[in-house]
Image: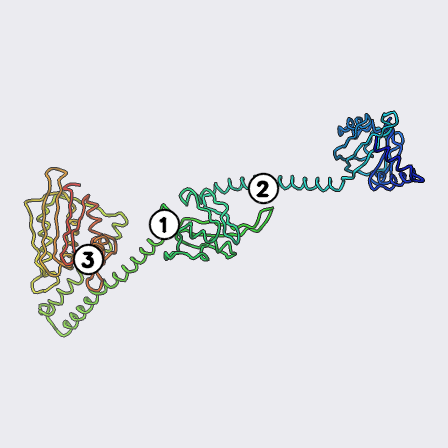
Amino acid sequence: MERLDEIAVRLAGISDPVRLLQGIFAYAPFGLQVYRADGHYILTNKAFRDLFGSEPPPEYNILHDDIAEKQGLLGLVKRAFAGETVQTPTFWYDPRDLQTVHVTEGRRVAISITLLPLFGASATVEHVALVFKDQTEETLARERAEAAQAEAEGLAAHRAEQERWLQTVLDQMPMPLIFVEPTTARVFFANAAANKIAGGSLARPESAEDYLRLFDIRDLEDRPLRVEDVPAVRAARGEAVSDAQIRWYTSSGMKVITIHAARIPAMLGHPETVLIAFDDITALKDAQAQLEEAVRVRQDFLSIAGHELKTPLTSVMLNVHAVDTSLRAGARADDPRLTARWQALVRQVGRLEGLVNQLLDVSRITAGKMVLMPEPIDLGDLVREVVDRFAPAPGITSESAAAIEVRVAGRVDGVWDRLRVEQILTNLLSNAVKYGAGRPITVEVGAAGPGDDAEAWFAVRDLGIGMSTDELGRIFGRFERGVPERNYGGLGLGLWIVRQVVDAMGGNIAVDSAPERGSTFTVRLPRRH
Ligand code: ADP
């Protein structure tokens, strides 16, 4: 009140105060409107009309403003008309939306209003002045920002769902997969198969250097990898990686791993990603090595076989030629030179036959076509018979010149395939002669235990070159030879055949040997099989 009085005093000093106040009202840069106490307005300024795009029609009454009512602001307006200065929050207002009056021209604006009751002399509200603040720009900007944020949040939620779905799919795949960030080589996803191959949970490198810290990885020659050679790092740096093979030492042993990488460009809101698929090919590599070894052994065998067959064949050719020449020169059949040639021919052809038989035996045994024809046999007799065949023929100084002693403890009867037992003995004796360094050879025959489950055994012992542990591990293999080919002939098949025959008869063979100390091969056979 006092303030108004003071203003009245000051205005009294001006020649035309009404004109001054008119000017302020008219040119104020914010919307102003004055209402009567009954809710009808009497004045608006230019800023008001610019703000709303028009003036309300005369019948408009703010106390019945349906927009204010809908916004829940009518109570606030009424309080101002009851004498209280009030301030509305910011709200959207378009005069064309008014239902109580008809407005055709207007603008939609965001406003906040200060309502000032103006009292008359009797201290009752005679007018209410409204001061409008235009908040359209700020409100639009804020609403846009909120909408953008909501959209971003919606997108992020959607992407998270998509990623969860994709991870579920990738976890079902049997192939280990990881996602790697380009450039940094950071691993940000590993599927279930990748975790499994790592023994539970795959370590996640954050940088290229991390790979060497977290994994013991090497090249196929077992040299530790350099950072720039790690396939995932190469792929992250933009190199094409396909079937890169490395060794990976995990808690469950060494694995050979093959690695493929694919670059997925940025798309559908996802950044560029390097997809790395890898697989454990240890078993495959082992099989490959075994196959290569098998092929090598067979190639060696072919050259040995060719050589082995060629040696006696050359002698046969020479002897045949010599016999032919002698006969043409009129030699008689009982000429001693011819006889020696004939005997040599018989030995050489016999050797050829032996070699060919071995080859045939191998294919027969491999095809599972070994047939046994058991008959009652006295093993002691059979051994003596075979040993007799090794006695040098009169007049011939052969390689089998070593003395062979037979020791038999009583009768050793059993039911066996005679030819196969002979074959076992012949092979073991030939080896004893071949590798026996010309020293005496012993064959012992015996039996263990009475009754049907009793065993018969024989042991062939020589005092020759013997074998190293390494050789002992190989000699029963097919085409395997312990000795260098140039020193001793042979196909490397004899012991393999012996082991197959002994197995087929339900027995077993053992060897006891040391280099330069000779070898003892002991065969045990059930008396009946
Ligand atoms: P081959 O005698 O034709 O080479 P075998 O299968 O009979 O083939 O023998 C395989 C290998 O076992 C021989 O190459 C030899 O190294 C070794 N071996 C066999 N018997 C003896 C033995 N009595 N003394 C020493 N080494 C032997």
Amino acid carrying label 2: it is: Arg
Ligand 1 falls in quadrant: bottom left
Q: Secondary structure at mark 3?
A: helix
Amino acid carrying label 1: it is: Met
* Disc 3 and disc 1 in contact, CB within 8 angstroms: no
Query: Is ligand 1 closer than 8 angstroms to the Cβ of mark 3?
Result: no
Question: x%, y% of residue 348?
Answer: 17, 63
Q: Secondary structure at mark 2?
A: helix
Specify the quadrant that holds the C terminus: top left
Question: x%, y% of residue 123?
Answer: 85, 25
Q: Is residue 195 left or right of residue 307?
A: right
> Distance between the Cα atoms at labels 2 and 1?
38 Å
Crowd band around label 2 with a 10 angstrom C-alpha radius: few (<14), some (14–19), many (20+) = some
Amino acid carrying label 3: it is: Gly
Q: Nearer the viewer, residue 23 or 446?
A: 23
Numbered label attached to residue 159? 2
Q: Nearer the viewer, residue 339 or 110?
A: 110
Q: Is residue 506 left or right of residue 117?
A: left
Residue at label 1? 254
Crowd band around label 3 with a 10 angstrom C-alpha radius: few (<14), some (14–19), many (20+) = few
Query: What residue is at 60 percent from the left and 41 percent from the top?
Result: 156
Numbered label attached to residue 354? 3
Displayed quadrant of residue 306: bottom left
